[in-house]
Amino acid sequence: MTLEITPMGAALGAVVSGLDLSQKLAAETVERLRNAWLEHIVLVYHGQDLSDPQLLDFTRYFGELEYPPSKLLNYSQGSGQKDDIPLEINVISNVIENGKKIGQLGNAEAKWHTDTPFVERPPAASILHAWELPPSGGNTCFMNMYAVLEALPAELLAKIDGKKCKHDVSHTSDGVLRHDYDDSPDAKSCPGPWHPMIRTHPDSGRKALYLGKRAWAYIEGTTTEENEEILDAIWAIAERPEFVYEHVWTQGDVLMWDNRCAMHRRDEFDGSQRRIMHRSQLRGDIPV
Ligand code: SIN
Protein backbone atom coordinates (compact mmCIF):
# COMPACT_ATOMS: atom_id res chain seq x y z
CA MET A 1 0.00 0.00 0.00
CA THR A 2 1.27 3.48 -0.85
CA LEU A 3 0.53 6.37 1.45
CA GLU A 4 -1.29 9.16 -0.37
CA ILE A 5 -2.57 12.45 1.02
CA THR A 6 -5.20 14.08 -1.19
CA PRO A 7 -6.54 17.54 -0.30
CA MET A 8 -10.35 17.80 -0.37
CA GLY A 9 -10.29 20.96 -2.45
CA ALA A 10 -12.39 22.55 0.31
CA ALA A 11 -11.56 25.14 2.97
CA LEU A 12 -9.79 22.41 4.91
CA GLY A 13 -9.35 18.66 4.95
CA ALA A 14 -7.44 15.89 3.18
CA VAL A 15 -8.01 12.16 2.68
CA VAL A 16 -5.21 9.80 3.69
CA SER A 17 -5.17 6.49 1.86
CA GLY A 18 -2.86 3.46 1.85
CA LEU A 19 -2.69 3.02 5.63
CA ASP A 20 -4.07 0.47 8.06
CA LEU A 21 -4.10 2.35 11.36
CA SER A 22 -4.26 -0.86 13.40
CA GLN A 23 -0.67 -1.61 12.30
CA LYS A 24 2.54 -0.09 13.64
CA LEU A 25 3.50 3.10 11.76
CA ALA A 26 7.07 4.01 10.77
CA ALA A 27 8.50 7.24 12.19
CA GLU A 28 8.65 8.85 8.72
CA THR A 29 4.97 7.97 8.12
CA VAL A 30 3.98 9.60 11.41
CA GLU A 31 5.99 12.69 10.44
CA ARG A 32 4.16 12.92 7.09
CA LEU A 33 0.81 12.57 8.85
CA ARG A 34 1.69 15.20 11.43
CA ASN A 35 2.72 17.67 8.71
CA ALA A 36 -0.41 16.92 6.70
CA TRP A 37 -2.59 17.41 9.79
CA LEU A 38 -0.96 20.79 10.49
CA GLU A 39 -1.42 21.84 6.87
CA HIS A 40 -4.95 20.52 6.18
CA ILE A 41 -6.41 20.73 9.74
CA VAL A 42 -8.70 17.70 9.20
CA LEU A 43 -7.42 14.28 8.05
CA VAL A 44 -9.82 11.52 6.98
CA TYR A 45 -8.86 7.83 6.96
CA HIS A 46 -11.53 5.58 5.43
CA GLY A 47 -12.23 1.89 6.12
CA GLN A 48 -10.48 1.46 9.47
CA ASP A 49 -11.43 -1.11 12.10
CA LEU A 50 -9.83 -0.12 15.40
CA SER A 51 -10.43 -1.39 18.91
CA ASP A 52 -10.23 1.28 21.64
CA PRO A 53 -6.62 0.33 22.56
CA GLN A 54 -5.66 0.57 18.85
CA LEU A 55 -7.29 4.02 18.58
CA LEU A 56 -5.35 5.13 21.66
CA ASP A 57 -2.08 3.67 20.26
CA PHE A 58 -2.64 5.63 17.03
CA THR A 59 -3.36 8.82 19.01
CA ARG A 60 -0.15 8.42 21.06
CA TYR A 61 1.95 8.75 17.89
CA PHE A 62 1.10 12.47 17.99
CA GLY A 63 1.51 13.24 21.70
CA GLU A 64 0.04 12.62 25.12
CA LEU A 65 -3.53 11.40 25.59
CA GLU A 66 -6.14 13.70 27.11
CA TYR A 67 -9.16 12.63 29.16
CA PRO A 68 -12.74 13.30 28.06
CA PRO A 69 -14.53 16.41 29.40
CA SER A 70 -16.57 14.57 32.06
CA LYS A 71 -13.35 13.34 33.66
CA LEU A 72 -11.56 16.69 33.27
CA LEU A 73 -14.51 18.40 34.94
CA ASN A 74 -14.64 15.81 37.71
CA TYR A 75 -18.37 15.28 37.36
CA SER A 76 -19.92 14.00 40.57
CA GLN A 77 -22.22 11.83 38.46
CA GLY A 78 -19.44 10.38 36.30
CA SER A 79 -19.66 10.11 32.53
CA GLY A 80 -22.26 7.34 32.44
CA GLN A 81 -19.96 5.37 30.15
CA LYS A 82 -19.68 1.60 30.46
CA ASP A 83 -16.90 0.39 32.76
CA ASP A 84 -15.11 -1.60 30.03
CA ILE A 85 -14.38 1.55 27.97
CA PRO A 86 -10.87 3.00 28.61
CA LEU A 87 -10.88 6.27 30.57
CA GLU A 88 -9.33 8.19 27.66
CA ILE A 89 -12.11 7.19 25.26
CA ASN A 90 -15.25 9.30 24.98
CA VAL A 91 -18.26 7.55 23.45
CA ILE A 92 -20.44 9.93 21.39
CA SER A 93 -23.79 8.24 20.86
CA ASN A 94 -27.57 8.50 21.07
CA VAL A 95 -27.94 4.80 21.92
CA ILE A 96 -29.69 3.78 25.13
CA GLU A 97 -29.00 0.30 26.55
CA ASN A 98 -30.74 -1.09 29.61
CA GLY A 99 -32.27 2.34 30.22
CA LYS A 100 -28.85 4.11 30.23
CA LYS A 101 -27.22 6.31 27.59
CA ILE A 102 -24.00 4.63 26.43
CA GLY A 103 -22.41 7.95 25.41
CA GLN A 104 -22.69 11.71 25.17
CA LEU A 105 -24.74 13.90 22.80
CA GLY A 106 -28.06 12.69 21.47
CA ASN A 107 -29.41 12.84 17.93
CA ALA A 108 -30.09 16.60 17.91
CA GLU A 109 -27.77 19.00 16.10
CA ALA A 110 -24.51 19.71 17.98
CA LYS A 111 -23.94 23.41 17.33
CA TRP A 112 -20.61 24.92 16.25
CA HIS A 113 -17.98 24.55 18.96
CA THR A 114 -14.36 23.71 19.67
CA ASP A 115 -13.75 20.75 21.97
CA THR A 116 -13.38 21.49 25.67
CA PRO A 117 -12.46 25.22 25.55
CA PHE A 118 -13.81 25.44 29.13
CA VAL A 119 -10.58 24.08 30.67
CA GLU A 120 -7.19 25.84 30.95
CA ARG A 121 -5.54 23.45 28.45
CA PRO A 122 -8.04 22.48 25.75
CA PRO A 123 -7.11 19.38 23.72
CA ALA A 124 -4.88 19.85 20.67
CA ALA A 125 -6.69 17.24 18.61
CA SER A 126 -9.76 15.06 18.59
CA ILE A 127 -9.85 11.75 16.74
CA LEU A 128 -13.28 10.29 16.00
CA HIS A 129 -13.83 6.71 14.83
CA ALA A 130 -17.20 5.78 13.26
CA TRP A 131 -18.40 2.48 14.79
CA GLU A 132 -22.04 2.61 13.77
CA LEU A 133 -23.84 5.14 11.57
CA PRO A 134 -27.44 6.02 10.71
CA PRO A 135 -28.29 5.58 6.99
CA SER A 136 -28.36 9.37 6.62
CA GLY A 137 -27.86 12.51 8.70
CA GLY A 138 -25.27 13.15 11.41
CA ASN A 139 -22.76 14.74 9.02
CA THR A 140 -20.00 16.69 10.76
CA CYS A 141 -18.84 20.09 9.46
CA PHE A 142 -15.47 21.68 10.14
CA MET A 143 -14.52 25.37 9.99
CA ASN A 144 -11.07 26.77 9.17
CA MET A 145 -10.35 29.35 11.88
CA TYR A 146 -7.15 30.65 10.20
CA ALA A 147 -9.26 31.61 7.20
CA VAL A 148 -12.04 33.13 9.30
CA LEU A 149 -9.51 35.33 11.10
CA GLU A 150 -8.07 36.51 7.78
CA ALA A 151 -11.58 37.42 6.58
CA LEU A 152 -12.46 39.68 9.52
CA PRO A 153 -12.67 43.35 8.53
CA ALA A 154 -10.16 45.69 10.21
CA GLU A 155 -12.73 47.44 12.41
CA LEU A 156 -13.96 44.13 13.83
CA LEU A 157 -10.41 42.87 14.28
CA ALA A 158 -9.56 46.02 16.26
CA LYS A 159 -12.35 45.18 18.73
CA ILE A 160 -10.92 41.75 19.62
CA ASP A 161 -7.18 42.11 19.04
CA GLY A 162 -5.34 41.44 22.32
CA LYS A 163 -8.63 40.63 24.09
CA LYS A 164 -9.58 37.48 25.96
CA CYS A 165 -12.86 35.64 25.88
CA LYS A 166 -14.38 33.76 28.80
CA HIS A 167 -15.39 30.21 27.86
CA ASP A 168 -18.38 29.27 29.96
CA VAL A 169 -18.04 25.87 31.60
CA SER A 170 -21.56 25.69 33.05
CA HIS A 171 -23.45 24.99 29.81
CA THR A 172 -22.89 22.42 27.06
CA SER A 173 -22.41 23.58 23.46
CA ASP A 174 -26.19 23.19 23.13
CA GLY A 175 -26.88 25.51 26.05
CA VAL A 176 -27.91 22.81 28.53
CA LEU A 177 -26.82 23.45 32.14
CA ARG A 178 -24.20 20.86 33.15
CA HIS A 179 -24.40 18.76 36.33
CA ASP A 180 -22.78 20.47 39.31
CA TYR A 181 -23.25 24.05 38.03
CA ASP A 182 -25.72 26.80 38.96
CA ASP A 183 -27.34 28.89 36.26
CA SER A 184 -25.94 32.41 35.73
CA PRO A 185 -27.98 35.48 34.79
CA ASP A 186 -25.69 36.43 31.86
CA ALA A 187 -22.51 35.51 29.99
CA LYS A 188 -20.40 37.98 32.03
CA SER A 189 -21.07 36.12 35.28
CA CYS A 190 -20.70 32.56 33.96
CA PRO A 191 -17.75 30.54 35.34
CA GLY A 192 -14.98 29.52 32.94
CA PRO A 193 -11.37 30.14 31.88
CA TRP A 194 -10.19 33.12 29.80
CA HIS A 195 -8.47 32.40 26.48
CA PRO A 196 -7.10 34.82 23.86
CA MET A 197 -9.55 35.50 21.04
CA ILE A 198 -6.69 35.33 18.59
CA ARG A 199 -4.29 32.54 19.43
CA THR A 200 -0.94 31.59 17.98
CA HIS A 201 -0.83 27.95 16.95
CA PRO A 202 2.08 26.40 18.89
CA ASP A 203 3.20 24.20 15.96
CA SER A 204 2.38 26.16 12.81
CA GLY A 205 3.10 29.60 14.32
CA ARG A 206 0.00 30.90 12.49
CA LYS A 207 -2.72 33.00 14.09
CA ALA A 208 -6.26 31.63 14.35
CA LEU A 209 -9.51 32.96 15.73
CA TYR A 210 -10.41 30.98 18.86
CA LEU A 211 -14.14 30.68 19.56
CA GLY A 212 -15.64 28.09 21.89
CA LYS A 213 -19.39 28.25 21.41
CA ARG A 214 -21.65 31.16 20.49
CA ALA A 215 -23.92 31.23 23.53
CA TRP A 216 -22.55 32.33 26.91
CA ALA A 217 -19.24 33.57 25.44
CA TYR A 218 -18.02 36.85 26.96
CA ILE A 219 -15.33 39.23 25.63
CA GLU A 220 -13.46 41.03 28.40
CA GLY A 221 -14.22 44.71 28.97
CA THR A 222 -17.45 44.80 26.96
CA THR A 223 -21.01 45.57 27.99
CA THR A 224 -23.58 42.86 27.35
CA GLU A 225 -24.80 44.73 24.26
CA GLU A 226 -21.28 45.24 22.85
CA ASN A 227 -20.40 41.61 23.58
CA GLU A 228 -23.40 40.25 21.69
CA GLU A 229 -22.93 42.71 18.81
CA ILE A 230 -19.25 41.83 18.29
CA LEU A 231 -19.84 38.08 18.59
CA ASP A 232 -22.84 38.21 16.22
CA ALA A 233 -20.74 40.07 13.63
CA ILE A 234 -17.88 37.55 13.93
CA TRP A 235 -20.16 34.51 13.74
CA ALA A 236 -21.99 35.89 10.69
CA ILE A 237 -18.63 35.81 8.85
CA ALA A 238 -17.40 32.52 10.35
CA GLU A 239 -20.46 30.55 9.24
CA ARG A 240 -20.00 31.41 5.57
CA PRO A 241 -19.81 28.15 3.54
CA GLU A 242 -16.43 29.09 2.04
CA PHE A 243 -14.74 28.31 5.41
CA VAL A 244 -16.42 24.93 5.90
CA TYR A 245 -15.88 21.29 4.92
CA GLU A 246 -18.84 18.93 5.46
CA HIS A 247 -17.96 15.31 6.16
CA VAL A 248 -20.43 12.60 5.14
CA TRP A 249 -19.42 9.62 7.27
CA THR A 250 -18.83 6.08 6.06
CA GLN A 251 -18.46 3.09 8.35
CA GLY A 252 -14.93 2.80 9.74
CA ASP A 253 -13.90 6.41 9.06
CA VAL A 254 -11.32 7.89 11.40
CA LEU A 255 -11.19 11.69 11.44
CA MET A 256 -8.44 13.65 13.15
CA TRP A 257 -8.86 17.41 13.48
CA ASP A 258 -6.81 20.24 14.92
CA ASN A 259 -8.85 21.68 17.75
CA ARG A 260 -6.60 24.76 17.94
CA CYS A 261 -7.62 26.12 14.53
CA ALA A 262 -10.93 24.40 13.70
CA MET A 263 -14.48 24.40 14.99
CA HIS A 264 -17.04 21.74 14.22
CA ARG A 265 -20.76 21.06 14.33
CA ARG A 266 -22.83 17.94 13.77
CA ASP A 267 -26.17 17.65 11.95
CA GLU A 268 -29.14 16.06 13.61
CA PHE A 269 -30.24 12.58 12.56
CA ASP A 270 -33.26 10.32 13.04
CA GLY A 271 -33.28 9.40 16.73
CA SER A 272 -34.66 5.93 16.05
CA GLN A 273 -31.36 5.13 14.26
CA ARG A 274 -28.14 4.22 16.05
CA ARG A 275 -24.95 6.31 15.81
CA ILE A 276 -21.87 5.27 17.82
CA MET A 277 -18.53 7.07 17.59
CA HIS A 278 -15.47 6.53 19.79
CA ARG A 279 -13.28 9.58 20.35
CA SER A 280 -9.76 10.03 21.68
CA GLN A 281 -8.03 13.35 22.29
CA LEU A 282 -4.50 14.72 22.42
CA ARG A 283 -3.36 16.93 25.27
CA GLY A 284 -2.94 20.58 24.23
CA ASP A 285 -1.15 23.71 25.46
CA ILE A 286 -2.53 26.70 27.30
CA PRO A 287 -3.68 28.96 24.43
CA VAL A 288 -1.50 32.07 23.92
C1 SIN B 1 -18.22 16.28 18.63
O1 SIN B 1 -18.86 17.32 18.71
O2 SIN B 1 -17.06 16.18 19.04
C2 SIN B 1 -18.88 15.08 17.98
C3 SIN B 1 -18.96 15.21 16.51
C4 SIN B 1 -19.72 14.08 15.88
O3 SIN B 1 -20.40 13.34 16.61
O4 SIN B 1 -19.66 13.95 14.67
Image: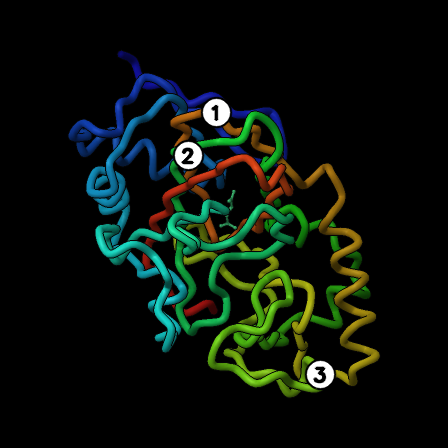
Name the quadrant containing residue 167: bottom right
Among numbered discs 2 and 1, the one appearing first in the sequence: 2
The mark found on residue 219 in the picture is: none
Q: Quadrant where the N terminus lies?
A: top left
Relative depth, front residue between 180 and 213: 180
Name the quadrant containing residue 234: bottom right
Query: What is the secondary structure assignment of the residue under circle 2?
Result: strand
Among numbered discs 1 and 3, the one appearing first in the sequence: 3
What percent of the width, then of the height, locates residue 190? Answer: 61, 83
Query: What is the secondary structure assignment of the residue under circle 1?
Result: loop
Q: Which residue is mark 3?
A: 186
Q: Amino acid at mark 3?
A: Asp
Q: Which residue is mark 2?
A: 130
Among numbered discs 2 and 3, the one appearing first in the sequence: 2
Q: Amino acid at mark 2?
A: Ala
The mark found on residue 250 in the picture is: 1
Furthest residue in direction front, as rendered: 98
